[in-house]
Image: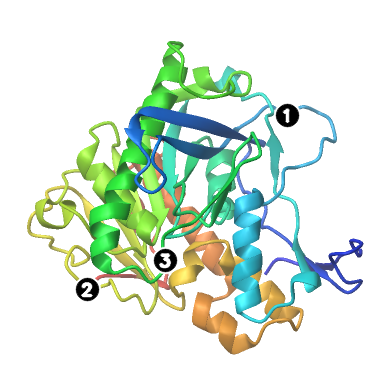
Amino acid sequence: MTTVAVAGAAPGSLSADAVVISLPSPTGKNPVGMTELHLTDADRNDPWAGGPRELLVQIWYPAQDSGTSAAAAAWMPPGGREEQADFLAELGVPRERWSLGLSHSYPDRPARGEVGKFPVLLNSPGMGDATGWSTAQAEDLASHGYVVAAINHTHEAFSVHFPDGRIEHTVVPLDSPQEVLRDVLLPTRVADTRFVLDELTAAASGHGSRATRALPAGLATSLDLTKVGMFGHSLGGSTTVQALHDDPRIGAGINLDGPILGSVATEGTEKPLLMLAGGASPWYGNPGWEPYWPSNTGIKLPLQVSGTEHMSYSDQQTILPQLTAAGLLPTETTTKAVGKIDPQRSIDLQRNYLRTFFDAVFGHNNLGIIEAITALAQPEVLPHP
């Protein structure tokens, strides 16, 4: 488990005994850069606010080693930190008793373009979540040679802080019925995903994009958009599977404990799909999660990680146990959210399965997908019976 450190007091905000929560280090050889991209889709109206649809995308990528001691970026951007503070307050953790440590990523550092191009992985967060809640996954993938682009789904995400100072808050209740998820949120999320991929393609081609600022040096030319994958947690997993169905450019996906919604539920997909479920997942065994999805023609690997829970597939897997270790959160609260599995073990499993799957898809490990995942077999990871 990662270490809990004692923070110095921040005047007016943190108490003298506040704890600093640490983020597990990435395991790859590449330094990691991080940047944000503000995009405006003038061809699409925002379904909640009207006017052109605006998005803020957080991108992690293999970066150059600058040789300097520049400060790392914040673990989460402002929207993610606000959401984290509200989430923990609801669990009874005083706001002044904790803070997040820094990430292992460096803001706007030049990309490591001298070693070739990198596959692009799109990421869609869980319902209502801002980007930054899957930093442990994203940084690790970037350290192993992937570009990860996570999408803030504006007006659904808890809050999105645009570069001009505007803050757009969620207008979507978390208890929205499944019909709203399927018929409103899912199509909007998929359209957001396809637009972000359009803009990354434009940037890589040199034809320009609708971004308000350029990508860090060398990043646009480092994008290998012949190799595009996607992953997401909860409703982000649902978005991944539907985007896989809808967009021919996305070659493979990973669903992290999300339901199967939309037309893909009946039509299936011919593309590779890895699915990791929590130990008590309500989706596991439901239509789309069963091993022999009748309309699915592609490789599908539904697995269940024993000892995990739904929030294990986000950074809560490392945050909540550290708060429990510090005496700020009851053990039963943490167990209910992220399970009984050892936190570092859970993070290691997730990182290994994500990387192994995409490495097989994009030819990095010289193994077929089924062969690679079979070879990775771990006692906690159970195939669908």
Between 373 and 277, the residue placed more toward the observer is: 277
Q: x%, y% of residue 350?
A: 48, 59
Residue in view at x 46 percent, y 22 percent: 210
Helix, strand or loop at label 2? It is loop
149 relative to 7, above or below: above
Name the front one of labels 2 and 1: 2
Q: CA distance from mark 3 to mark 1?
A: 43 Å
Specify the label residue 65 is tagged with. 1
338 relative to 108, above or below: below
Regarding residue 148, the answer to whether it shows in the image is no
Judged left or right of residue 161, residue 279 is left
Residue in view at x 59 percent, y 54 percent: 136
Between 174 and 195, the residue placed more toward the observer is: 174
Q: x%, y% of residue 149?
A: 49, 38
Give the quadrant of residue 86: bottom right
From the image, which quarter does the N terminus lie in?
bottom right
Judged left or right of residue 35, residue 211 is left
Specify the label residue 95 is tagged with. none
Most distant residue in the left direction: 294
320 relative to 31, above or below: below
Helix, strand or loop at label 3? It is loop
Q: Which residue is mark 3?
A: 173
Q: CA distance from mark 2 to mark 3?
A: 27 Å
Circle 1 packing at 10 Å, graded few (<14), some (14-19), many (20+), is some
Judged left or right of residue 301, residue 362 is right
Q: Which residue is mark 2?
A: 285
Circle 3 packing at 10 Å, graded few (<14), some (14-19), many (20+), is few
